[in-house]
């Protein structure tokens, strides 16, 4: 290992959280270039402090064998969060390269029945950690905001759901506040084990068009959107005991659409105001 990589390793070992934040701010290819000469265990020790989506993007840039070594060295909770970011073919390829104990553990954790909240949740929704400033959060939205929704979920470095806030809250706050100081901590969630009937009957669809999904330990699986329920309702063809869900869902769909229109207007107006002030 040359001097540059020894210095990099020393920094990662001494300041893993700060290093994780720095890696998240770089292009994934650039982050992978900084890490690729290091042992998988050392890389894992830092990437465990990154958000799952950032870790997944970096691992995809590493060689397949090194990526498998990194995931094998992670704790199971972190590895599960990362694996859920991959598309199914990539996820299976990565799982096949993991050592037997870790691979078996992760497969069990990923094995939720079809049409449970755990299997239906979108794991790639945009998330933020609680310990970054609002300005950095907005920069991340600009870079990785393709998956951003009206609600932004805040998860800690162990993938536990800590809070929720809206895009508008972030965009109108020009202070150096941390994201964690703005979030709402009383969160309505769906259990990852909830079946289709339980999901459809959840009383909070009358208030929210998207709900976060967590397991019994509070690990964030992703979010389930109202529009997904529309598709599920169509697929079951009225076979499930949905009662008057059809009319309710139609009303909620209209609310969801109007909310989306208001959101885009708010974002555009806020960005214009910020540009004028700047």
Image (cartoon, rainbow, N blue to C red):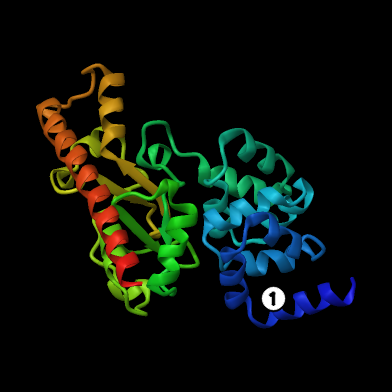
Q: Give the position of the C terminus as an image quadrant.
A: bottom left
Q: Nearer the viewer, residue 194 or 188?
A: 188
- The image position of residue 132, as x and y in percent, is 44, 73
**Element under label 1?**
helix
Q: Nearer the viewer, residue 31 or 50?
A: 31
Q: Which residue is mark 1?
A: 12
Task: Give the answer, above or below, for where 16 lies relative to 119.
Answer: below
Pick out the residue farthest to the right.
2
Q: Quadrant of residue 198?
A: top left
Q: Residue at x 17, y 27 (%)?
A: 242
Q: Is residue 266 left or right of residue 2?
A: left
- The image position of residue 122, as x and y in percent, is 41, 42
Q: Residues within 10 Å of mark 1 (few under 14, many from 20)?
A: many
- The image position of residue 222, as x and y in percent, is 40, 48
Task: Give the answer, above or below, for where 110 lies relative to 184.
Answer: above
* Residue 166 visible in the current orientation: no
């Amino acid at each position: 290992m040359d001097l540059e990589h020894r210095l990099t390793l020393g920094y990662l070992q001494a300041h893993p959280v700060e290093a994780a934040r720095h890696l998240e701010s770089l292009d994934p290819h650039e982050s992978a270039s900084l890490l690729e000469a290091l042992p998988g265990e050392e890389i894992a020790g830092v990437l465990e402090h990154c958000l799952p989506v950032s870790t997944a993007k970096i691992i995809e840039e590493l060689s397949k064998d090194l990526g498998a070594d990194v995931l094998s060295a992670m704790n199971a909770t972190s590895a599960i969060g990362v694996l859920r970011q991959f598309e199914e073919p990539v996820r299976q390829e990565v799982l096949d390269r993991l050592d037997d104990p870790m691979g078996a553990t992760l497969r069990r954790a990923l094995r939720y029945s079809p049409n449970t909240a755990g299997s239906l949740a979108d794991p790639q929704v945009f998330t933020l950690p609680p310990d970054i400033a609002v300005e950095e959060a907005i920069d991340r939205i600009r870079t990785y905001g393709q998956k951003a929704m009206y609600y932004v979920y805040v998860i800690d470095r162990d993938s536990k759901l800590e809070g929720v806030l809206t895009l508008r809250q972030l965009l109108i706050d020009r202070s150096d506040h941390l994201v964690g100081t703005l979030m709402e901590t009383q969160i309505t969630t769906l259990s990852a084990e909830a079946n289709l009937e339980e999901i459809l009957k959840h009383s909070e669809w009358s208030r929210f068009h998207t709900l976060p999904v967590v397991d019994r330990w509070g690990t964030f699986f992703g979010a389930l959107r109202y529009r997904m329920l529309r598709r599920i309702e169509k697929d079951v063809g009225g076979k499930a005991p949905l009662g008057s869900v059809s009319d309710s869902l139609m009303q909620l769909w209209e609310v969801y659409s109007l909310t989306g229109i208001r959101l885009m207007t708010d974002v555009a107006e806020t960005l214009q105001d910020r540009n004028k002030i700047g």
